[in-house]
Amino acid sequence: MSGVMPTSEAHLSRARRVVVAMSGGVDSSVAAALLKKAGNEVIGVTLKLQECHEAQGSRSCCGVDGIARARAVAGQLGIPHYVLDCVREFERDVLRPAWDEYAVGRTPSPCLLCNERIKFGLLNEWARRIGADCVATGHYTQVERSADGEPVLLRGLDPEKDQSYFLAGLDREQLAALIFPIGHLNKSAVRELGRSLGLSTAETHDSQDACLVGPDQSFAEMLRERFSAASREGTIVDEAGAVLGQHPGIHHFTIGQRRGLGVSSTSRRWVKEVRGTDGVVVVTDRDDALLARRLVAAGMSWLAPRPPDGSVLECMVQVRYRHTATRASVSCSASGAVAVTLHEPVRAVTPGQAAVLYDGDRVLGRGWIDVC
C-alpha cells in the first residue's frame, strides 16, 4: 500500500516501558514474552470487568480464571502483574449502552465499545500515569506509520484471526500509543511460540467475546436481568402483516435469525425486521428478502482523513466481524453520517452493528449501522 511503511518487527526492541494487557490467553502471553525478550520493561495488567462471584466458570477474557492464568505467566516471565478494577466503568460504558440498544430492537457491538472505552481508554490512562511509553495487546492487527508520521491501522496477517474490525473505532491518539506484537503472525505460529517459550497458557482456549454470559443464557437476557428491565413484548408477523404468534421480548431477536423464533411453520423463516416502535418482529420465508444494497452509518470515527461533504469514497465495507468486506461507494454528509451503496447485496445487515471502511488492508473509519 502506497504511503504506508512496511510491517516490521523493529517496534518490539526499542527498550521502552510497555504495559501489556494480559487476558490469560496465549495471544497476550506471547505478546508479553516477545516484548520482554526484546529488552523492553514489561508490566502486565489484567482488566477486572466483573465481580469475582459473577466470574465462576467463565471463559471470558475477564473471568477470575483469566486473572490467575495471566498472573502465572507474569511470574514465568519475571514481570510485575497488576489487576485494574474496571467493573463500574464496564457496566456504565459498555453493558448499559448494549442493553439500551437491545431494548429498542437493535443489535449492539459491545466488544467495540469495550475496546474504545475500557481497554484502550482506561488502560491507556493508567499506562500514562505510571510513565509507560505505550500499551500492547495480543490482538491480531497491525499499526504502521504513514509517510507523514500518522498511525495507520491495518488488518492482521492471519485472515482467520484478523481483529482490526473490533479496533476500528479507536482514535489517532489511542492508536499512536499502541503496539501489537503478534499482528504479523498467524495463530498456529503464536501457539508454537507459546510452546517453545514454555508458557503455561500455550494450549489455552481462545477467550469468548461476550463477557458475563452464562452457559444457558443469552447476552441480551443477561443484560435485561442485570438492569431489571422490562421486556418489550409483541407480535410476530409475516411480510403481509398476518400475525403468526407472540414473543416475550424484542431483545431475543436479530436480523437474519432463524432458530428460536417461536412460530410453527412448514418452511424456514428468518427475522427480517425488529421494530422498536411497536415491538413487532417481522419474519420472512424468502432468503433474498434479507439482502441489502444500501445502509446508513452514523457516528463515524475516522482514522483516515475525513472525506469532504458531498464527496464519494470508493472503498471496501465490512458489516460484521465474520463478514467478507464488500466493495462500496460511500457518500459523506455534514451530519457526520455516511450513506453506503454496496456494489453487491449483503445478507442480514443489522442496525446497531459496526460498518468498518477499508482501503485494502488499511482501516479508514467506523460507523454504527442505523438504517438499512
Image (cartoon, helix red, strand yellow):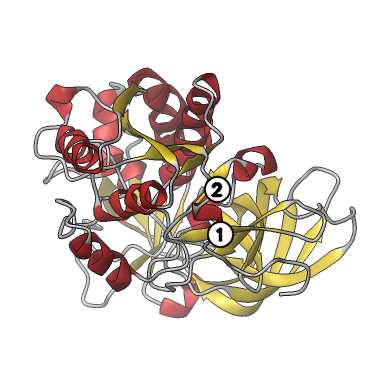
Nearer to us in this view, 7 or 155: 7
Helix, strand or loop at mark 2: loop
Would you name the residue on which mark 1 appears? 10
Q: Position of residue 333 (x, y in %)?
A: 83, 51
Helix, strand or loop at mark 1: helix
Nearer to us in this view, 333 or 212: 212
198 to 105, vertically: above or below: below
Q: CA distance from mark 2 to mark 1?
A: 7 Å
**From the viewer's perspective, is 20 left or right of 247?**
right
Q: Are marks 2 and 1 in contact (CB under 8 Å)?
A: yes
Would you name the residue on which mark 2 appears? 14
Q: What label sits on residue 284 in the rendered view?
A: none
Task: Give the total number of marks visible in the rendering.
Answer: 2
Dot 1 crowding, Cα within 10 Å, few <14, some 14–19, many 20+: few
Residue shown at 64%/70% (left/top)?
6
Identity, as a three-letter code, of the amino acid under mark 2: Arg
Q: Position of residue 214 (x, y in %)?
A: 15, 40
Residue shown at 31%/54% (left/top)?
30
- Does residue 351 appear in this view? no
Identity, as a three-letter code, of the amino acid under mark 1: Ala
115 to 227, vertically: above or below: below
Nearer to us in this view, 243 or 67: 67
Residue shown at 28%/21% (left/top)?
228
Q: Position of residue 176 (x, y in %)?
A: 64, 44
